[in-house]
Image: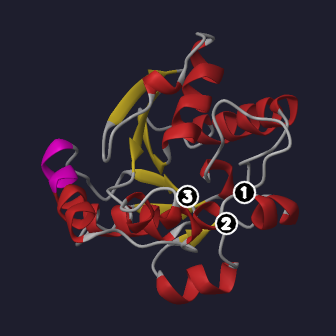
Amino acid sequence: MDILFIRHGQGEHTLDIPKSFQIENPSLTSKGMEQAKLLRKTFPLSHNDVIFISPLRRTLQTAQIWSEKIACRKIVSPLVSPRMFPLLPNKNTLPCDTLPVVATIKKEFPNFEVDMTVSHDLWIDGINILPEHEFINVGKEFIAACKSLHKEKMYIVSHDGTITSYRQLISGEKLSREDFQFETGWAKVSC
């Protein structure tokens, strides 16, 4: 199976760093919306496709714009929410990466499935500062769940640190922040 990790489009939280990191659950900018539209040409979707999406507004908007008019399966999961990379000790999740409550997601994106098989704690805290050994365990479980869907390819709309963490987990290669994807950039990993 091939997993195509796609980073969300430009978000409001990137416009005035570090001050803009304080924006809670930021949206895409107009540039980010245009970037998401371009994904339609790069990765045309069909009704057979499955997209896993981080629970944050910028990733949900990216997937919504990209998949407009395509009745593919869209699954929201905290297992692809923001992740600090590399993991730094004693750090907290920034407001821009704090997960919204599930009710907000269901209200704003009613056509998306919300994966309630994931533990309640992960819906509260996400994987951002999860200790590495715990991330490896939930990451392996997530990849196994993806494989159980029996698709040749899987799409995941997520964040630069999360994408790099999963790429490192799957490939076994040592990666760094220099391996981050740009806005709506992508990486393909076979597993």
Between the C-alphas of marks 3 and 1, the distance is 15 Å
Residue 3: percent from left, percent from top:
46, 33
Image location (x, y in percent) of residue 175 = 55, 17
Q: Does 41 lie within the magenta span?
A: yes
| Quarter of the figure that contains the C terminus | top right
Q: Residue furthest top?
A: 173
Identify the coloring: secondary structure
Tags 1 and 2 touching, CB below 8 Å: yes
Q: Earlier in the sequence, mark 3 or mark 2?
A: 3
Q: Is residue 155 above or below residue 46?
A: above
Q: Which mark is residue 93?
A: 1
User: Vertically, is 98 above or below 151?
Assistant: below
Which three-letter amino acid code belongs to the residue tagged 2?
A: Thr
Badge 1 amino acid:
Thr
- Type of amino acid under label 3: Ser
- Residue numbers of the magenta segment: 38-42
Q: Main secondary structure of the magenta part?
A: helix
Which residue in the protein does label 3 denote?
54
